[in-house]
Amino acid sequence: MRIDIITVLPELLESPFNHSILKRAQEKGLVEIHVHNLRDYSTDKRHRRVDDYAFGFSAGMVMQVEPIFRCIEQLKSERHYDEVIFTSPDGEQFSQPMANRLSMSGNLIILCGHYKGVDYRVREHLITKEISIGDYVLTGGELAAAVISDAIVRLIPGAIGDEQSALSDSFQDNLLAAPIYTRPAEFNGWKVPDILLSGHERKVAEWEHEQALERTRQLRPYLLDDEE
Ligand code: SAH
């Protein structure tokens, strides 16, 4: 898999991709992540500007269509992309089923907005999918791109040491995860549930499933009505 991220602030993306699972997945050759500085595609050689004032009367700067067009066209001339994603607060809400689907892609482009956002023609003509990571407004799409990439890459087989563990995480099977504990079995008088120390594999599995169901009923009841 390959993810190409287009941004005006490449530095913002350095840390998330250079640690932990995202770093290891790249080292293992499971994913290539390329960050492109949109300013390299600016038509303004001197100041490398990529934004301009909005038409109409709204305040704030807007990312111009041409540098984005040039960057996306360049990438598309090199390989096929399954989706050209724009991070946007009004996009489709990111979710585990969406992460699952995207993790099966070959190549993805993620465009990060900044300032007031991008010239709408980008969204009309160049973008195939718009994703929001929640109903709140961020300063830029970089953190959203990092969130989306993290959730996708950890699902690629081999990215997480114990593959089972990605499948037992919250939202897989539309269930939240059961409570987990580690040693010591008692701390400060606070005890781990006896069943987990019983060594009885089937009963432990049943207990975990009941706990997962109960937590889902309490905390995310709508997941139990979901068909997906
Ligand atoms: N004026 C826009 C917000 C611009 S915020 C509006 O009212 O909708 C600047 C950029 O940050 C956006 O273009 C988008 O790329 C990114 N962004 C902000 N909030 C986001 C969210 N919840 N999910 C994904 N991207 C977001």
Image (spheres, rainbow, N blue to C red):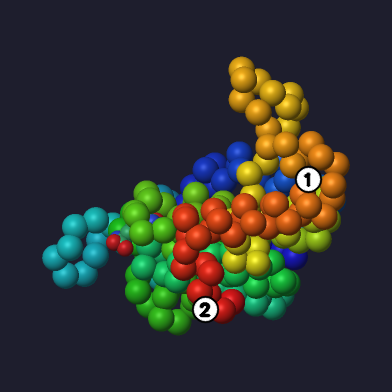
Vertical arrangement, residue 206 with respect to residue 101, above or below = above
Which residue is painted at 69% across and 52% down in the image?
A: 208
Residue 128 shows which numbered tag?
2
Instruction: Residue 192: tell me if it is visible.
Output: yes
Q: Secondary structure at mark 1?
A: helix
Which residue is painted at 64% across and 56% down in the image?
A: 210
Where, by quadrant of the figure, is residue 65 drawn? bottom left
Residue nearer the viewer, 27 or 213 = 213
Residue nearer the viewer, 202 or 102 = 202
Mark 2 or 1: the one toward you:
1
Vertical arrangement, residue 119 with respect to residue 40, above or below = below
Q: Which residue is mark 1?
A: 24
Where, by quadrant of the figure, is residue 180 drawn? top right
The 10 Å Cα crowd at callout 2, few under 14, some 14 to 19, many 20 or more, is few
* Left or right placement of residue 151 versus residue 78 in this view: left
Q: Are marks 2 and 1 in contact (CB under 8 Å)?
A: no
Where is residue 219 shown, x and y percent of the image?
A: 47, 55
Which residue is painted at 50% across and 74% down in the image?
A: 225
Residue nearer the viewer, 106 or 38 = 106
Q: Secondary structure at mark 2?
A: loop
* Left or right placement of residue 50 versus residue 153 in this view: left
What amino acid is found at the position of numbered circle 2 in the picture?
Thr
Cα distance, mark 2 to mark 1?
A: 29 Å
* Left or right placement of residue 65 versus residue 167 in this view: left
Furthest residue toward left: 57
Furthest residue toward top: 188
Quadrant in which the C terminus is drawn: bottom right
Where is residue 94 shown, x and y percent of the image?
A: 50, 64
The 10 Å Cα crowd at callout 1, few under 14, some 14 to 19, many 20 or more, is some
